[in-house]
Amino acid sequence: MIVRIMGEGQVRLDDSHFPKLNELDDELMTEVEQGDHEGFRRTLAALLEAVRSMGTPLPDDSLEPSELILPAPEATIEEVRAMLSEEGLIPLEPPARS
């Protein structure tokens, strides 16, 4: 799966990492809902670092379609709230590929 971190670029990530990312996504969603700015900042950083460390960066000139878009590290709690779906930022299951 191709993941874009806004303002940074794209990363190729294996679907096997979904459980760990969903744990962090659930924490982030709870913190957004509770208005926990400190927890939000900490968990957003952990989520983005997990994607960076588990994934393989794509070259800067690569323009693959992103299957998942994550906020920039400096995103506000309000910006992330606007990006959330019922499942959070990350779907419960990896997107189906054609």
Image (spheres, helix red, strand yellow):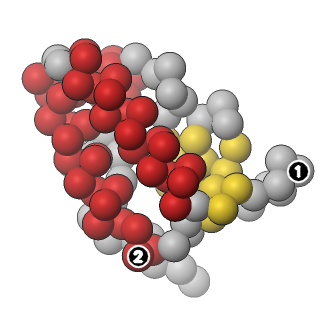
- Name the residue rendered at 52%, 61% in the picture: 54
Q: Is residue 25 above or below residue 97?
A: above
User: Where residue 42 appears, x then y in whole percent?
Assistant: 32, 28
Up/down of 30 relative to 53, above or below: above
Q: Secondary structure at mark 1?
A: loop
Around disc 2, counting alpha carbons within 10 Å, would you say few (fewer than 14), some (14 to 19), or many (20 or more)? few
Judge left or right: residue 92 versus residue 59. Answer: left
Instruction: Please report the residue visible at 18 percent of the width from the left and 29 percent of the height from the top.
Output: 31
Q: Is residue 63 visible?
A: yes
Q: Is residue 97 above or below residue 35?
A: below
- Percent coordinates x, y for residue 38 in the rendering: 25, 17
The correct choice, above or below, for 61 with respect to 41 in the image is: below
Within 10 angstroms of label 1, few (less than 14), some, or many (20 or more) residues?
few
Q: Residue furthest bottom?
A: 98
Residue 58: image location, x then y, percent: 75, 58
**Residue shown at the point (41%, 76%) measured from the top left:** 16
Q: Is mark 2 in CB contact (under 8 Å) with mark 1?
A: no
Kind of element beneath mark 2:
helix
Q: Nearer the viewer, mark 2 or mark 1?
A: 2
**Residue 17 found in image quarter:** bottom left
Residue 24 location (% of width, % of height)? 28, 47
Residue 67 shows up from this direction: no
> Which one is earlier in the sequence, the residue at label 2 or at label 1?
2
Residue occupied by mark 2:
16
To which residue does mark 1 refer?
Answer: 61
